[in-house]
Image: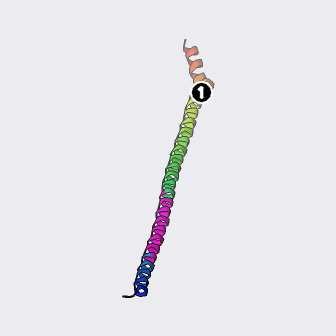
Amino acid sequence: MTRQTVQYVVMTRQTVLYKVMTRQAVQYEVRTRQTVQYEVMTRQTVQYEVMTRQTVQYEVMTRQTVQYEVRTRQTVQYEVRPRKTVQYEANSPVRDKQSSTRQTVL
């Protein structure tokens, strides 16, 4: 083989190696981008899950607030009813009749 042939073979091999390394570098960059995209999607998924949990917590707190308000109203109604009952009994004509009848009997 002549020197020129040897040089040609060497350059051809170097060119092939360069192309292979370039392809590998491109593949590495593609994989890196895919990894970054995966990480971004993972973060977004975690954020979605966090927001979902916060939404559930908000709904639970809202239900608890509604229950608290209902209980408060029930308590107020319960406290108001006995007062009305006492006032009704105090002003009841039936009671007045009974008391007057008792006074008559005595």
Where is the N terminus found, in terms of image quarters?
Answer: bottom left
Quickly name the residue at label 1: 83
Q: Is residue 28 magenta?
A: yes
**Residue at the extreme left:** 1
- Is 5 rendered above or below residue 90? below
Taking the spot 57% from the left edge, 34% from the top edge, the residue there is 77
Q: Quadrant of residue 19?
A: bottom left
Residue 4 location (% of width, % of height)? 43, 86
Is residue 39 or residue 96 the one in the foreground? Answer: 39
Residue 81 location (% of width, % of height)? 57, 31
Q: Is residue 38 magenta?
A: yes
Is residue 44 or residue 95 the one in the foreground? Answer: 44
**Residue at the extreme right:** 91
Residue 32 location (% of width, % of height)? 47, 64
Residue 91 location (% of width, % of height)? 63, 25
Amino acid type at circle 1 is Arg
Taking the spot 62% from the left edge, 26% from the top edge, the residue there is 87
Is residue 61 or residue 101 the one in the foreground? Answer: 61
Q: Is 14 displayed left or right of 66 in the figure?
A: left
Is residue 95 or residue 9 the one in the foreground? Answer: 9
- Is 60 rendered above or below residue 19? above
Q: Residues within 10 Å of mark 1 (few under 14, many from 20)?
A: few
Where is the C terminus found, in terms of image quarters?
Answer: top right
**Which span of residues is magenta-colored?**
18-42
